[in-house]
Amino acid sequence: MSNRRVPVASLPGALPQTQIDPGTDAKAIAASLTLDFGHLEASDFTKDAFWRDTYALTGTLRTFHTNQTIVAAFRDVCETREPKGFRLHIHDATLAKTWIDVPFGFEVTATPKTTCSGILSLVPSAGGWKIWVMRTTLEQLVGENDVDKLETAPKKEPSISLDQDGCQFGAVVVGAGQAGLSVAGRLKALGVEYVVLEKNDNVGDNWKLRYQSARLHTTRQYSHLPFNRTFPTGQYQEWLSKDDLARGYQDWAHTYGINIWVSTALVTGTWDKDTLFWTLKIVRGGKSCTIRCAHVILACGAGGQVPVMPALPNRERFLGTVLHSAEYLDSSNFKGKNGIVVGIANTAHDVAEDMVDARLDSVTIVQRSRTYVMPREYYQKVQDLLYNDSVSTEYADRLTFSQPLAIARLLAHQGLHAAAREEPRRFDALEKAGFKLDRYGDIMHYLYDRMGGYYMDVGASQKIADGKIRIMSDSLPIAYTSTGLRFGDGAELPADLIVFATGFEQDMSLLVRRLFGNAVAEQADEFWGVDEEGELLGAFKPNNQPNLWYHGGALGHARYYSRFIALTICTALKGTPFPVYRDPQRFETFQRKNNSVALPPGTIT
């Protein structure tokens, strides 16, 4: 298990090439299998097989590649975790174009006892059917509440007061966006005492306070929070606006009685390695208080939502308005004037479209690097296959997020690039307008290596092709002038409004250092980017700094991986932590000394 960051494109793997006859009976193939899970051999797998485990046997997120590596690791974890009762769900076997998926289930009998699920992806070979991909996933803790179900709360559920210092929790969640709300709901479902700290005045303000035209670029059905369909068909539009999201989050938090302290900021925290507790200093409504907890979950963005603002010289000379996109609301006061947007990802395009709609005289996007453009309908076609009214969100998430990243990347390329090849003129028009295009971009590179930087086309590309939005891509701005920006090639662009859509700080260590000091920051993991197995660094799994968690990502990531954070915290608080499989024949307990520490009352019910 490595913490070395590697490019997504370097991950090994290939899709099966042998087509399977559409008339093949997948259920009959599944019924014919004679696998002995207790004694899996390298010959049961293809040579380039994958096994991805999501907390079921490794106590973390691990991906193993090649048949020899898989068998060695599987034998290691089985010896310690003692899985039993493997059973194939033959009647649920399904046929894909080049493989057959066979679900299965099993139990882990070592402490903590769990129920688990899995999927075998089988491909034909000369000697019969072999496992190309094996997935194993933690489902539930035996004897505990269901992490995927939460009863609605009474209309007036009491909340914890901060009249006195010293409140104590099993977990404190920092941030009430999709990540914070999701993990809070899961913790409540499992009976863990928790609180969410939200710096804004209202749940949903992280969306509501954005620019007026902001909306979600992913489908409504993909965007639910846990436990229910947060944005039901007929009650919400297909492409959710910022106000839709804010309303949905508020309604969800109220429905499930989530314990949230709004207008509350975490100022600093200290970790006690002897008691395994955090002491947190917070400010709530202007009042300073101290609380204690066993676990801290950071769900407030990689860098705490700190804007990145290029410092160009001569700012004092410019007579117009300069904003970061975090400050931008709309362009209604600039009708008939000139606008420049520096940046090229989703927000930059949104702001430029907003300027066009506000009837500015000229709108220019400054493109700083070649950019992948993915039309929204391409992505929608893929998402709608699983995320719809007929398929449960939980089932869709299992299929989507249990796949090894290397394989998910190749499948995404297969669908998205085929769609792009079918309409070359669409992209030709962008290039003709001066847009530097990554026509067949690697979406996983943008999501996991860069944490953004691409454009999900919701309409701005046509405005660029039509000349309504101009592109400046040959040179970068080097200084302000009194009337706009000067570029490296000597060109000048006039502007009355300049918006820098240049993103936010992405270094989690800066936030950790500011909140918890140098010692914790030096020990804590990095956040985002992938390791050599294709697993995200730091996210959704035990941290090198005990009892510190990073949670974030898109709506699907937040919803799905919240369940594993909550399950791990729940069993640790009960004194039975998951052993974490780091390297061959080496397990670690992520919460050190946990079994010998007396947890104070009120951390779990």
Image (cartoon, rainbow, N blue to C red):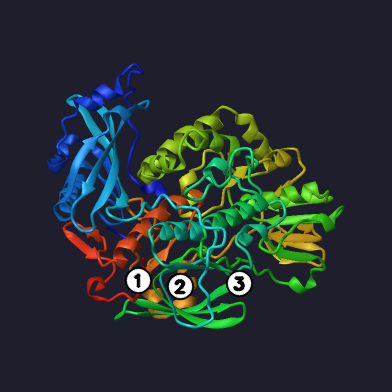
Q: CA distance from mark 1 to mark 2?
A: 11 Å
Residue 263 is labelled as 3
Q: Which of marks 2 and 3 precedes in the sequence? A: 3
Q: Is residue 419 above or below residue 574?
A: above
Q: Which residue lies under the disc numbered 2?
A: 512
Q: CA distance from mark 3 to mark 2?
A: 21 Å
Identify which amino acid the numbered label 2 is placed on.
Val
Closer-to-camera residue (17/139): 139
Quadrant into which the C terminus falls: bottom left
Task: Check the picture and name the quadrant holding the N terminus.
Answer: bottom left
Q: Going 83% across and 57% down the picture, which residue do you hit?
A: 334
Q: Secondary structure at mark 1?
A: loop
* Mark carried by residue 504: none
Q: Residue at x 55, y 59 (%)?
A: 177
**Can residue 125 be seen from the camera position used here?**
no
Of tags 1 and 3, the one toward the viewer is 3
Residue under pointer 1: 545
Q: Secondary structure at mark 2?
A: helix
Nearer to us of marks 3 and 2 is 3
Q: Amino acid at mark 1?
A: Gln
Q: Earlier in the sequence, mark 1 or mark 2?
A: 2
Residue 45, percent from left and from top: 21, 36
Find residue 338 and report its horizontal and vertical position in percent.
Answer: 82, 55
* Left or right of 556 in this view: 80: left
In the image, taking residue 287 as reference, residue 318 lies left or right, namely right
Residue 22 vertical placement versus 332 (above, below) = above
Left or right: 47 as drawn, with respect to 18: left
- Front residue of 513 and 481: 513
Q: Is residue 182 left or right of residue 232?
A: left
Q: Residue type at mark 3: give it.
A: Ser
Percent from the top left, x then y, of residue 391? 46, 35
Question: Are dots 1 and 2 in contact, CB under 8 Å?
Answer: yes
